[in-house]
Image (tube, rainbow, N blue to C red):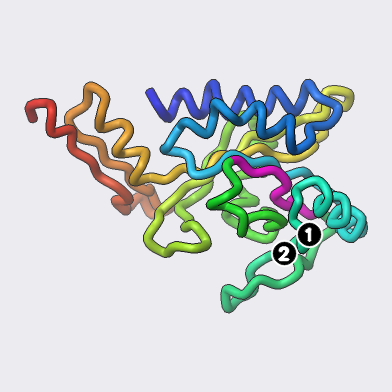
Amino acid sequence: DILQDIRNNEINGLARFFESSDYVDREEFNHYAQSLVNNHAVSAWGWAPLTAAGDSRDFETQAAKETGQEDYHIWQFDDTGKRVPSSGGNLRCPVYHLAPDTENIMLYGYDISSNPDLWQACDRARRTALPSASTLTYKTDSKDQKTIVIYQAVFDRNAPGKVQGYVFAILRLNALVEAVGHQEVNTLEISLIHNDGSLEPLATGLNRGLPP
């Protein structure tokens, strides 16, 4: 099962990789992610560490060197959808590593904590120590590409309960349906369950190689 593999093996393995390392640089992250990027249902794998708001400038300087993004800044969307410097709160959770980064380069520095829906999923991952999915979101460069993001908290192995940051996987729902469609299933529908119990269909696929 593709979803179970992403949740139980791939993102969990990525989290364990960070927890067992003192520090993971860009080269090490890309090397580990080489096998993960073959999963076409996932748009990007990433790492977003926690950092104090007061340390943002030093963090950005280090991140610019590490990621190769000379204009690396910690940012968020304002009410009009414009990119602005991240503000509010004492913590930041900026995207630091991405694979592949060619089609997701615009996500570098995005402060996950600035988005209530995404941050709620991160908090759930922290409290349960299990992968947690966001509500429906969209790629920043396309309003037609429906995605969800799965987060896994990375804990400090020397300080139980302390979160260092979050690894994540951005799932492309249409690609996920297409991938599952090649398995032994007739139809697949992915729906979002709202708080009132109503369902919002997100993606549907049919395996035309199997009888109905």
Q: Which residue is mark 1?
A: 70
Residue with the most extreme left position: 211
User: Residue 6 location, x and y as percent?
Assistant: 49, 28
Q: Quadrant of the C terminus?
A: top left
Q: Position of residue 35 (x, y in %)?
A: 55, 26
**Identity, as a three-letter code, of the amino acid under mark 2:** Trp
**Residue drawn where x is 53% and y is 47% of the image:** 134
- For image coordinates 60% across by 76% down, the residue present is 79
Can the viewer see residue 91 in this picture? yes
- Describe residue 156's horizontal placement relative to residue 197 as left or right: right
The image position of residue 53, as x and y in percent, is: 86, 58
- Residue 93 among those drawn in magenta: yes
Residue at 36% x, 38% y: name it.
176
Q: Can the viewer see residue 127? A: no
Residue 30 occupies quadrant:
top right
Q: Residues within 10 Å of mark 1 (few under 14, many from 20)?
A: few
Q: Which residues are magenta?
A: 92-99
**SS class of the residue under badge 2?**
strand
- 48 in the magenta segment: no
Q: Residues within 10 Å of mark 2 (few under 14, many from 20)?
A: many
What's under tag 1, amino acid-wise?
Answer: Glu
Q: Secondary structure at mark 1?
A: loop
Q: Provide the residue designation for mark 2.
A: 75
Position above or below: 105 against 181? below
> Distance of mark 1 from mark 2, alpha carbons?
14 Å
